[in-house]
Image (spheres, rainbow, N blue to C red):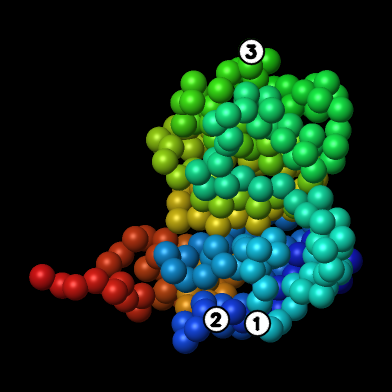
Amino acid sequence: MTSGDLMLSLKDVRKSFGPKTVLDGLSLDVRKGESVVVIGGSGTGKSVMLKCVLGLIRPDSGSILIDGEEATKFNADQREAALRKFGMLFQGGALFDSLKVWENVAFGLIQGRKMNRDKAKEIALDKLGQVGLTPDVGELSPAELSGGMQKRVALARAIAAEPQIIFFDEPTTGLDPIMADVINNLIISCAKKLGASTLSITHDMASARKIADRVAMIYKGRIIWQGPVSEIDHSGNAYVDQFIHGRAEGPIKMDVLKP
C-alpha cells in the first residue's frame, strides 16, 4: 500500500487529560474507498480518536494525515479546507429542531459553502431521496419523525456535500434490529455511490459485520488487532473474542463492584 492509497493515516497518536491517558500510541489507516470500523468498549478512546481527526481535540503527539496532509499542523484555513472533505453522522442524529428537515440536510451547504437556498434545497431533496425519504418529508420538523427517519435525515446531511470521507459515530444506536439493518444498507449504498472512505465507531457487532471491509479493535487507547471483517471470528486475540461475543469473563475487566 502506497501513501497515495490512504485517505486517513494516524501514527502513534497520543492524548492525555491530566493523569489519564486516553490515546496511547494509536495507529490506524483508512484507504481510499475503504470502510473501516473501530470497535471497543466505552472509555477506550474511540470518540477521542475521532475528535482528534476532526480537529476538535489536538493530540499531544503523533501524526494525523488527511489525504496526505499533516493535520496536526493545519492553520485555520487549512483545517476548514480539510473539513470540506468530511461528512459526519452523529450518534444522536444532532438535528436542529428549529429547522425543517430539508434545511437540516442543506445546513452545511448554506452556512458552510454559502450556497443559494434554492440550489441547496434541490440537493437536499435529492439526498433525502437517496435515503428513501420523499420530498414532503423535507417540509416536516425533526420532531415529527420517528427515530429511524431522523437517522436517515442525518445520513442525508452527512452525504449532502458529497464528502470524500464519512465518519459514523454509533450509527445504529437506539434503533430496532430491522431499522438498524436498513441504516447499515443505506450506509453501504451511499458510500459506494460517492466512492467515499468511511470510518465508523460502534458497539454493534451486527453493524460492524455488515458495513466493514476491515475491523480494528481499540483497547486502552491503542489498536490491539485489525484485519478483514471475514477474519474477526478467527482473530486469535482473546480481547477481540471476548468483545464480539459479549462475555463478562475474559481479559477485559469492567470497573464494577461485585455484589
Secondary-structure class at tag 1 = loop
**Dot 1: within a 10 Å radius of its alpha carbon, few (fewer than 14), some, or many (20 or more) residues?**
some
Instruction: Report whether residue 174 is seen.
Output: yes
Nearest the eye: 147 or 210: 147
The numbered mark, 1 or 2, whose residue comes first in the sequence reads 2
> What is the quadrant of the C terminus in the image?
bottom left
Quarter residue 13 falls in:
bottom right
Residue 16's tag is 2
User: Which sits in the foreground, 211 or 65?
Assistant: 65
Residue 60 is marked as 1
Residue at image x 83%, y 21%? 118
Farthest top residue? 136
Tell me which amino acid carries mark 3: Asp
Q: Which comes before the other along the chain, label 3 or label 2? A: 2
Q: Label 1, label 2: how many angstroms apart (C-alpha)?
A: 7 Å
* Residue 152: % across, % down: 59, 32
Extreme-front residue of the structure: 98
Amino acid type assigned to the residue bearing label 2 in the image:
Ser
Asked if the residues shown at circle 1 and circle 2 are in contact, with their CB atoms under 8 angstroms apart, the answer is yes
- Residue nearer the viewer, 114 or 199: 114
The residue where tag 3 is placed is 136
Query: Residue visible at 66% across and 48% down?
Result: 88
Q: Classify 10 Å Cα crowding around label 3: few (below 14), some (14-19), many (20 and above).
A: few
